[in-house]
Amino acid sequence: MKAITWHGKGDMRCEQVPDPRIEHPRDCIIKVTSCAICGSDLHIFNGVIPTMKSGDVVGHESMGEVVEVGPECRNLKPGDRVVVPFPIACGECFFCQKGFFSGCERSNPNFEMARKLWGNSPAALFGYSHLLGGIAGGQAEYLRVPYADVGPVKVPSHLTDEQVLFLSDIFPTGFMAADFCDIQPGDTVAIWGCGPVGQFAIRSAFILGAGRVIAIDTVPERLAMARAAGAETLDHLEEDIYDRIMEMTKGRGADSCIDAVGTEPDNTSSVMAMVDRIKVATFMGTDRPHVLRQAIHCCRNFGTVSVVGVYGGFLDKVPFGAVINRGITIKAAQTPVHRYLPRLLQMVEEGKIDPSFVITHRAGLEDGPELYKTFRDKQDNCIKVVLKP
């Protein structure tokens, strides 16, 4: 089959790889009808994510048609149309039973590797390094889904692929970002990053009752999309974000702040941001937490900072003194998609949101490697890429 594979920093290829097969009785195989390039895939493309191996199949936003099921996967049958959550969860362990599916204790076969870095292992993820399982991803013609009796969710025939594909990751992630904020009616929510996750966080914040959303980015088309959703926008290369948010909130700060950027912010307008970049480039640091620092400073006393941007290692000069002295709550997670997906699918069915609004580019798998570059470099007004195997 054809798949997009990683061969080193900046080197994605569309090439022939072996077809997946049933490896466990709870597996299924799906024929992928739609998949997407996620902002977190760019961290792989840029060589930031460790334990990738040449030839790894990437991608974690996928959906399609079931073509084969293992003997213990009794909830699915060939022909079922499903969307696949990006974390892999057994459905039976301590964390799955509590609804924390992205903390599954069983799905990561490289549990010990993750525990050495993070103190314990989260769930395995599709197409996202051997640290997180080494499970082949879904930017491919076919995908093996472990624990398929728990993960894939059937979707109704009257909804298009583009309306439901993002239930695999970016819609639940954006919604979780807002949900973490415990938004009260009329709250002000500041959101760093107007990429796909940020766009869903904006809309989710309004759905959950925010009175005002302040969206921060520098890419014109992303800022325009945010304004179309009702957000007020700030360009971080044109304005001092801390000063402007304090001005807009009468000196108090935002009720909650969302970091939808993570480890690779584009901001080079501050000394600390440039220092972060130098440290990572010279292997003196693992991440660039400029946005997280700014979000903490811009949050009001006893507010919440919600972190859904990807970080991988150890963060330098995070102002934890501000957190403890000002009573700020920090919430962060890889999204337990299974927990949110049924509720969000119902929203789509009821017409409360059409997730396809974020798509700007559609192509086949063979165009994927070039579109990685387009997406990373923010060329051609690119905000979200959907691939049709």
Image (spheres, helix red, strand yellow):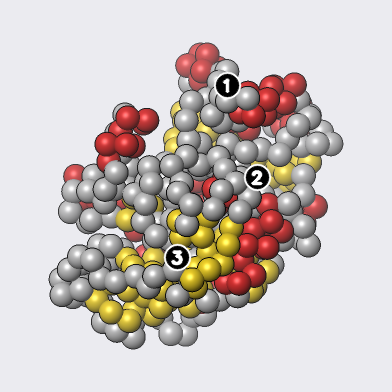
Rendered location of residue 158, percent (x, y): 47, 85
Q: Which residue is mark 3?
A: 138
Q: Nearer the viewer, mark 3 or mark 1?
A: 1
Say whether disc 3 or disc 1 marks the residue closer to the N-terminus: 3
**Camera-side residue of 307 and 132:** 132
Q: Residue at x 58, y 36 (%)?
A: 263
The correct choice, above or below, for 359 with respect to 304 in the image is below
Q: Left or right of 33: which side holds 101? A: left
Q: Secondary structure at mark 1?
A: loop
In the image, taking residue 85 as reference, residue 40 lies left or right, namely right
In the image, residue 104 sits, relative to residue 33, either above or below, namely above
The three-letter amino acid code for the residue at tag 2 is Gly
Let me know if residue 185 appears in the view.
Answer: no
Which mark is first along the chain, 1 or 2? Answer: 2
Task: Give the percent coordinates (x, y) of residue 199.
Answer: 62, 54
Whether residue 105 can be seen here: yes
Q: Residue at x 69, y 45 (%)?
A: 215
Of discs 2 and 3, which sits in the foreground? Answer: 3
The amino acid on which the numbered mark 3 sits, given as a three-letter code, is Gly
Image quadrant for the N terminus?
Answer: bottom left
User: Between tags 2 and 1, which lies in front?
Assistant: 1
Badge 2: residue crowd in 10 Å (few <14, some 14–19, many ≥20): many
374 or 290: nearer the viewer? 374
Question: How far is the residue under mark 3 from the one under mark 1?
Answer: 33 Å
Label 2 with label 3: CB-CB less than 8 Å = no
Residue 193 — which label? 2
Q: Which residue is mark 1?
A: 284
